[in-house]
Image (tube, helix red, strand yellow):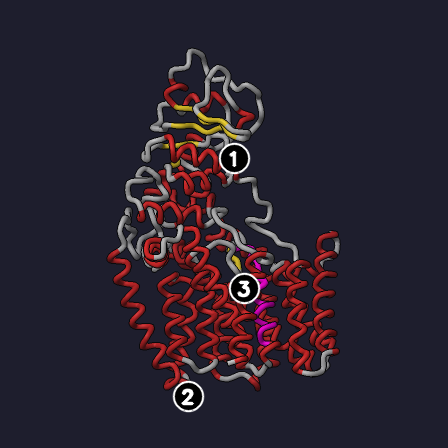
Amino acid sequence: MRRAILLGLGIVAFTWLEFEFVPGHSYLQSGTQIYLPSLERLDTPGYLSRDLVATHPHFTYTIYDEVTLFLHKADGMTLEKALIGQQFLCRAAAILGVFLLAISAGLSDPLALLAAVLLNLGAALAGPAVRLVAYEPTPSGFAFGLVLLAMGLLAREKPLLAGLAGGMALVYHPATAGPFWVPVLLAFILDRRLRSLLRPALTILIVFVLLLANLAQLQPGVGDPQPFFGKLTPQLAALQQYRTKFVWVSLWAGTDLWHYLAIWVCGMWAAARLWPILNRQMRWFLLTLPTFGILSLPLSDLLLEHLRWSLISHAQPARTLLFTVALASLACALAGLRAAVKRKTLEACLWLFVVFALPINTRVLDFLRLSKSIDRAQLLLCVALACGLALALRQIGTTKWRAAVLLFPVAAMFAIPKTGVGTAKMNETPIREVADWAEANTWGSSMFLFPDAGRERYPGIFRAESRRALWVDWESGELVDYFESAGEEWWRRWEQTMQGAYSPERLESDLPLPIDYYVLKRSNRLVGIRPVFANKEFVVYDSRDLRNASAPLKARIAVPS
């Protein structure tokens, strides 16, 4: 009991630390700008009825909306708290899952928890544009944490609980959870010694597959359904290559493939070092899942870029590289910690170098290039962290004191630079003031446009906070991966109103559009037109005032946008 309590406290503490520091978390900075409007429309159908994003939810085959809305209505949580609560629990599940995997490889409790925390420092995958630990509370992030828990439970021979965790991952995000179930099925077919262990998990899988099918049938508010075997039109393919380049492997694999191959080799090498002490389940995971990640690249290239199967842009199989990076990090951590305990300090430093390199830069071959100061700084940081941990483990001789090394990843959280979405947050107070004004003073069906926003993210914050429709913004362009007609409509609107530099002349040409309010940066305020709302950053104009202006629209101060 004492062990379970201490373990639970440790998992909660480290989940909170990495939630607040590295890798951190964000809200309404990326993925939630797309998911939240759809959730708000499902919760209150009277709002956002004219918004492209809200009327085209792309979580049809998930339980994401049902769970979030249940928490929102049953417990009275805001949607934000319901989402962040799920995110915290799934991150804790990831730490517990990796801890169980490390325990099954023979590590002591403190070292197993250390391995879990090191993996949960995260990694940003260049190319497929995903993160090992997702910043935002999105279905794929929830599913990946549950998959790690399912792997850990299966490694500890808890098939019913593993099936439950893996099944929950499946109904949160099938594309993320699917790769976990492939080696489970292969092992059941090919490995007789594992059949009795895996049978209960596969029975639960069938239940969740049926649940997933029912969820898809009951999903409200779905428009523009896509055929399962549909083909991309040339126009939609061109839009995806413009707006969501990460889906098209050929646009980035030539540069990034070599880095992922290097990570895969490190993971396989570490797994070979650990092979004698691994149970059969662990062997299947460490051998197959990282390899699936590498093979997903030519598979995606074949199915999407040559056969033009539209489903592939939804599923984005290249995201399976998450498993390549995660299990390579785990294998190297296990090999490094075991080497350090055996006082093989140099070997431990080499393995731990890979573990610390991944949160800093997944383009690991860049560490071999010392021409740039940033490359030299990253190399020195990795060497310092790896050697510091290896030497600390060498000096701590007893299991009783070995828990002290758990302070090391806390220090690493402050040493590793935080990169990506949310690291340089804008001051959201001004845009939230605009959203509060709009919610209190405009009709729920009102349409807004931010014509000088370009690719900035603040219009999406406005939409979510005000529950008012946007004519178009950059983040809503992700619809091109999911809905053909909505994607083409997004491009028509974007090209007409936002593509290129802002000017008052272009704004005037947009006035015939069914837009009720235009929001400009204060630096681009107009001459002779009184805004209906203004604060230190933004001015809001009623479209009727702009149409009735007695002179052509002109900026008070000419500032390039």
* Tag shown at residue 193: 2
* Residue drawn 57% across the image and 27% down it: 560
**Reading the chain from its start, which is encountered first: label 3 or label 2?**
3
Residue 484 visible in the current orientation: no
Judged from this view, the residue extending furthest toward the top is 550
Badge 1 marks a residue whose secondary structure is helix
Q: Which residue is mark 3?
A: 15
Point out residue 78 in the picture as x, y percentages from the top left corner.
Answer: 40, 50
The three-letter code of the residue at mark 1 reads Pro
**Reading the chain from its start, which is encountered first: label 2 or label 1?**
2
Point out residue 96 in the picture as x, y percentages from the top left corner.
Answer: 50, 72
Q: Are marks 3 and 1 in contact (CB under 8 Å)?
A: no
* Tag shown at residue 430: 1
Q: Are marks 2 and 1 in contact (CB under 8 Å)?
A: no
In space, the residues marked 3 and 2 are separated at their CA atoms by: 36 Å
Please name which of the two marks, 3 or 2, marks the residue nearer to the observer.
Answer: 3
Q: Nearer the viewer, residue 253 or 357?
A: 357
Q: Does 119 lie within the magenta span?
A: yes
> From the viewer's perspective, is 361 left or right of 77?
right
> From the viewer's perspective, is 226 left or right of 157?
left
Magenta segment, which residues?
112-127
Q: Is residue 511 above or below residue 394?
A: above
**Reading the chain from its start, which is encountered first: label 3 or label 1?**
3
The quarter of the picture where the C terminus appears is top right
Residue 313 visible in the current orientation: yes
* Residue drawn 43% across the image and 24% down it: 532
* Residue drawn 28% across the image and 47% down it: 223
Disc 1 crowd, CA 10 A, few/some/many (<14, 14-19, 20+): some
Q: Nearer the viewer, residue 549 or 367?
A: 549
Q: Nearer the viewer, residue 91 or 340?
A: 91
The three-letter code of the residue at mark 2 reads Arg
